[in-house]
């Protein structure tokens, strides 16, 4: 068996308690198990290197580009190619194994990963458009055409795309969806299953993780949590009855390392419909471990230190999937909106702010009922991208319509260049709007709060503006070359506009007077290891970390809750010691989760700062 992670923020190594690298290595203590993390950038370089010369030859023959232009294009980092290459890499690593278990990135991005094979088809179409010019010329000169390395490459791209696409849909591929016994998680599951089904990929199995078992002794927390979970899971049979459903219980210690994982795997239980308990009448707040100082200062950072000094300021919330970053972002935004005009934006493709406020939102900023100064917008990155795509195609057509000689191949290539636009581009273009808002170009707000996609992809989003700017600039350089034949026109204007917005976005992100990143985590080892990696990456990107929220701290009074509470306390303490210079905030666990203005406000007022 090979277990391989395609999540850019992989937790495999921490989970298995073994070193995991880009090539499969045996997991100590398990006879036939090997593990690997896909390193997409490395895999892409390895994939491209033997093909570079052929790509360059096709481009030089098919367009007005010269060697230098082409080599510049091929050197561009292509964000999003990682997803395609990730799949190709899994297929490569899978050779020689009987079973391959793939651990994918969180929801929104998994859906993209599974759509990746189609991108290979689009690359093939672009390259084919370039090559067709060459084929026509050769045929006209010689009277016949013999296929060459270029045609072989096009065929390879096409067949790789088809092979991956049918592999994902074959009987040997099973998708197991992992969820939590919470209403929001089940909504996300239903959405994902519908999206996968529409793409012809069947979900076979549903795994409900961290189900609270009966408490060993009386425990208000466990009782409330069990009632809440039973109500959340009541519709399970009706909505997912055709799937194989199983559950794992919540366990005292985090399941890390082979012995703990073995013991957990013995606790997988087929799902049985359970009695639905009465509604949780009183909100139950988790009690933090009693061993720590009782009198801690209240949370100061809503007033000082964390909020950027420039107006409008920009606060980005990010963290691992499932840590509650949307809830934290919403609670903080509500607090700020008591005195400021605040725009709360979600860029996570799996939007959840609607659930947090119990109100529907869309791509237009809408006021929150009962909080007039707070507006919410859930960015529809796909429709923003469609708009850009339409503008781009109109501009290309307009430019080439004025062309005085030939150029059909170039026009097709220019049109397809945007089809190829890496999957990450839509989010960045949508977020470039945010940059306009925070740099005051279109601002009616004092503060913009952004709920980002889970870690790995939030980082990609933050890295992408620079990469995309290189991309637009390379396109502009090419366009300059074409200027004498097609004139610059609106295509140049469009690229300049895009490049300007990206520059503004980049500048806004790394402006410490304007922008702060709030890392949301949980008091457990895996999330806090990932948060440490996130903080290091943010430092590397020159993005100022404003604070860390350790969410869902505290449990009940039974033996299991107390053990979990002690482990939580150790994690909070470790964080406090490692990151003394940041504002570290403890936010209490609650059943049911704080949704709606009243619950969010009460919850936020219980936040405590553990650093001074
Ligand atoms: Zn308990």
Image (cartoon, rainbow, N blue to C red):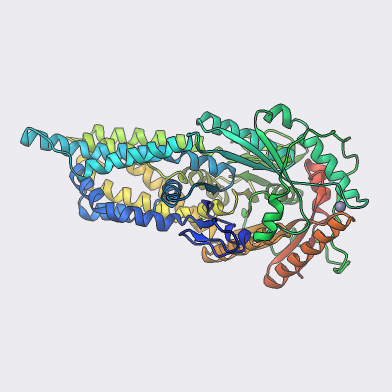
293 left or right of 432 in image: right
Residue 276 at what x, y percent from top left?
A: 84, 33
Res. 188 in view: yes
Res. 307 in view: no
Residue 343 at what x, y percent from top left?
A: 65, 45
Instruction: Determine which quarter of the picture holds residue 349.
Output: top right
111 left or right of 228 in image: left
Residue 294 at what x, y percent from top left?
A: 88, 66
Viewer-proximal residue among 254 and 281: 254
Name the image quarter holding the C terminus. bottom right
Residue 267 at what x, y percent from top left?
A: 73, 48
Q: Image point 50% across, 57% down: which residue? A: 36
Q: As drawn, which residue projects farthest toward the front?
A: 31
Q: Image point 61% across, 60% down: which residue? A: 16
Viewer-proximal residue among 248 and 405: 248
Q: As drawn, which residue projects farthest toward the left?
A: 142
Instruction: Determine which quarter of the picture holds residue 314.
Output: bottom right
Instruction: Determine which quarter of the picture holds residue 373.
Output: top right
Q: Image point 28% across, 35% down: which residue? A: 412
Number of numbered discs on residues:
0
Viewer-proximal residue among 429 and 135: 135
Vertical order, 569 against 453 (above or below): below
378 left or right of 498 in image: right
Viewer-proximal residue among 266 and 359: 266
117 left or right of 273 in image: left
């Amino acid at each position: 068996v090979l277990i391989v992670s395609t999540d850019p923020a992989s937790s495999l190594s921490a989970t298995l308690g073994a070193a995991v690298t880009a090539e499969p290595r045996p997991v100590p203590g398990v006879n036939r198990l090997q593990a690997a993390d896909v390193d997409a950038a490395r895999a892409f370089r390895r994939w491209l290197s033997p093909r570079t010369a052929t790509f360059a030859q096709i481009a030089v023959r098919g367009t007005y580009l010269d060697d230098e232009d082409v080599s510049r294009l091929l050197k561009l980092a292509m964000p999003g190619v990682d997803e395609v290459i990730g799949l190709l890499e899994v297929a490569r690593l899978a050779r020689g194994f009987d079973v391959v278990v793939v651990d994918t990135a969180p929801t929104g991005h998994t859906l993209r990963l599974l759509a990746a094979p189609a991108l290979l088809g689009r690359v093939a179409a672009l390259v084919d458009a370039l090559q067709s010019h060459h084929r026509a010329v050769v045929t006209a000169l010689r009277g016949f055409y013999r296929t060459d390395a270029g045609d072989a490459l096009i065929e390879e791209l096409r067949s790789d795309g088809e092979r991956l696409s049918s592999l994902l849909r074959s009987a040997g591929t099973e998708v197991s969806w992992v969820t939590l016994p919470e209403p929001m998680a089940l909504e996300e599951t239903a959405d994902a299953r519908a999206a996968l089904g529409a793409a012809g990929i069947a979900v076979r199995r549903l795994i409900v993780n961290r189900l609270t078992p009966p408490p060993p002794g009386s425990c208000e927390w466990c009782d409330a949590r069990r009632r809440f979970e039973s109500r959340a899971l009541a519709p399970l049979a009706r909505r997912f009855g055709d799937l194989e459903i199983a559950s794992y219980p919540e366990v005292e210690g985090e399941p890390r390392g082979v012995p703990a994982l073995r013991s957990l795997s013995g606790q997988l239980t087929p799902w049985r419909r359970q009695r639905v308990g009465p509604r949780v009448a009183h909100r139950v707040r988790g009690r933090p471990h009693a061993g720590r100082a009782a009198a801690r200062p209240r949370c100061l950072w809503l007033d000082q230190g964390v909020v950027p000094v420039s107006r409008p300021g920009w606060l980005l919330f990010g963290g691992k999937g499932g840590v509650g970053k949307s809830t934290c972002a919403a609670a903080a935004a509500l607090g700020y909106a008591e005195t400021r005009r605040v725009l709360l934006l979600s860029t996570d493709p799996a939007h959840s702010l609607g659930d947090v406020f119990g109100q529907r939102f869309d791509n237009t900023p809408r006021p929150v009922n009962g909080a007039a100064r707070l507006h919410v917008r859930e960015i529809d990155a796909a429709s923003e991208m469609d708009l850009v795509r339409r503008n781009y195609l109109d501009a290309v057509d307009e430019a080439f319509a004025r062309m005085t000689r030939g150029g059909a191949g170039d026009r097709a290539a220019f049109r397809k260049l945007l089809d190829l636009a890496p999957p990450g581009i839509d989010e960045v273009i949508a977020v470039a709007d945010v940059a306009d808002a925070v740099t005051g170009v279109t601002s009616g707000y004092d503060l913009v709060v952004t709920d980002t996609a889970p870690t790995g992809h939030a980082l990609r989003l933050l890295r992408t503006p620079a990469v995309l700017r290189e991309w637009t600039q390379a396109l502009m350089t090419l366009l300059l070359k074409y200027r004498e034949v097609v004139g610059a026109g609106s295509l140049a204007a469009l690229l300049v506009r895009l490049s300007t917005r990206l520059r503004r976005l980049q500048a806004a992100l790394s402006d410490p007077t304007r922008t702060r990143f709030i890392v949301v985590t949980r008091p457990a080892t895996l999330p806090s290891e990932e948060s440490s990696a996130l903080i290091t990456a943010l430092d590397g990107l020159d993005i100022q970390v404003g604070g860390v929220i350790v969410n869902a701290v505290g449990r009940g009074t039974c033996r299991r809750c107390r053990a979990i509470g002690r482990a939580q306390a150790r994690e909070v303490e470790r964080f406090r010691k490692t990151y003394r210079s940041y504002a570290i905030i403890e936010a209490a666990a609650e059943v049911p989760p704080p949704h709606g203005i009243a619950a969010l406000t009460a919850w936020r007022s219980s936040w405590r700062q553990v650093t001074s």
